[in-house]
Structure formats: C-alpha cells, structure tokens
Image (cartoon, rainbow, N blue to C red):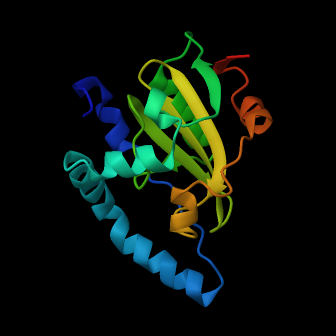
C-alpha cells in the first residue's frame, strides 16, 4: 500500500516491450499486452491468499531473510529524493514495471528492455536502498524469469548509469 505522498508512483510511465520478430514471441507479446493491466489485481489476490508469498519464498531463498532479492547496489544519495532519482531513470529509458512481484518495502520497480528477451531491472525501496539486476523479460520466458534463470549481477553497468545518484555499499 502506498502512502499519499507516494501517489506519483502510480503516474509513472509504463515500461515498453519491444515487439518481437518471431511469430511465437508475437503471440506472447499480445498475451502480455492483454494480461498486464490485470496483473496487479492477480498478484495482490494471490498474496492476500498466501499463495504468492509462499511461491516467492520457495523460489527465491534469500527473500526468506530480507524479503528482498539479491544484488544490492547501494543507497540513494541523500542529496536526492526518490522522485528525482526515478525521474532520472525514466529519462534513461526505464519505465514502471507493473507485472513484477513486490519485494518488502519496495517503492517502485523499473525496467528497461533491450529487446523482447532481456531487461535491466531496478527496485527502489522506501529506506533508499537500490537493488538491480539483468534478466529475461517475464514476457519472453515467464517460468525461467520466475525461477531466476539468467538472473545476473551487472553492478558495473548500473554503477556507471547511477554514479552520482547512489552511495555504493562496497
């Protein structure tokens, strides 16, 4: 649940999927275009019933401890607000990733698709923590995405992109 001062998150532009050339991927593309507006409702219902939380904790073991996925990049520089940081990421081609699961205390989930197959994924948390990874898009390989096949740490790339915005954890 978002606080009233976090209403700006709902108004963020959606991430864009790249239209694929393979016919089977085009079918996936259209399925996800139709399903995406329903996903927040489906996600929230499954979590309310306990099914979603159980699935995520079984699939992503590190979330049992912290409720957050791996690949901590750092904390947001105190000179900037989360809103300013997210605006910067949007100017770099990221968009709100509505179909992502929510980590504990997540403020916003953003992604930048390179093509239909791969994306950069950034999560910003209420405490200023920023976590990032590179992975298959859920549209291309939903089950591999869910079990984190191809889930990669791309810290150097994210550090270069966010050099002045983040205070690294290392």
How many numbered callouts?
A: 0
Residue located at (20% from left, 46% from top)? 48
Residue located at (50% from left, 78% from top)? 28
Where does residue 1 sit, x and y in percent of width and height? 24, 34
Where does residue 93 sit, x and y in percent of width and height? 61, 48
Does residue 141 show up?
yes
Where does residue 36 sit, x and y in percent of width and height? 37, 64
Quarter of the rendering containing residue 21: bottom right
125 sits to left or right of 114: left
Q: Quadrant of the C terminus?
A: top right
Quarter of the rendering containing residue 131: top right
Q: Is residue 56 above or below residue 24?
A: above
Does residue 92 show up?
no
Q: Is residue 26 above or below residue 60?
A: below
129 sits to left or right of 1: right
Residue located at (59% from left, 41% from top)? 91
122 sits to left or right of 127: right
Residue at far bottom of view: 23
**Front in this rendered view, residue 50 or 138:** 50
Where does residue 92 sit, x and y in percent of width and height? 64, 42
């Amino acid at each position: 649940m978002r606080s009233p001062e976090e209403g700006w998150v709902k108004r963020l532009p959606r991430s864009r999927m790249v239209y694929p050339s393979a016919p089977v991927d085009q079918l996936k593309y259209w399925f996800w275009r139709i399903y995406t507006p329903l996903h927040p409702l489906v996600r929230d219902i499954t979590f309310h019933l306990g099914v979603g939380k159980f699935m995520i904790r079984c699939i992503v073991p590190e979330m049992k401890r912290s409720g957050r996925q791996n690949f901590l990049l750092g904390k947001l520089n105190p000179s900037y607000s989360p809103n300013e940081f997210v605006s910067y990421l949007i100017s770099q081609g990221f968009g709100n990733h509505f179909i992502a699961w929510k980590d504990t205390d997540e403020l916003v989930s953003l992604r930048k698709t390179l093509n239909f197959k791969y994306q950069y994924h950034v999560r910003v948390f209420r405490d200023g923590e920023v976590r990032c990874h590179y992975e298959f898009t859920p549209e291309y390989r939903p089950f591999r995405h869910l079990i984190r096949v191809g889930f990669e740490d791309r810290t150097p790339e994210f550090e270069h992109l966010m050099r002045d915005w983040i205070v690294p954890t290392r």
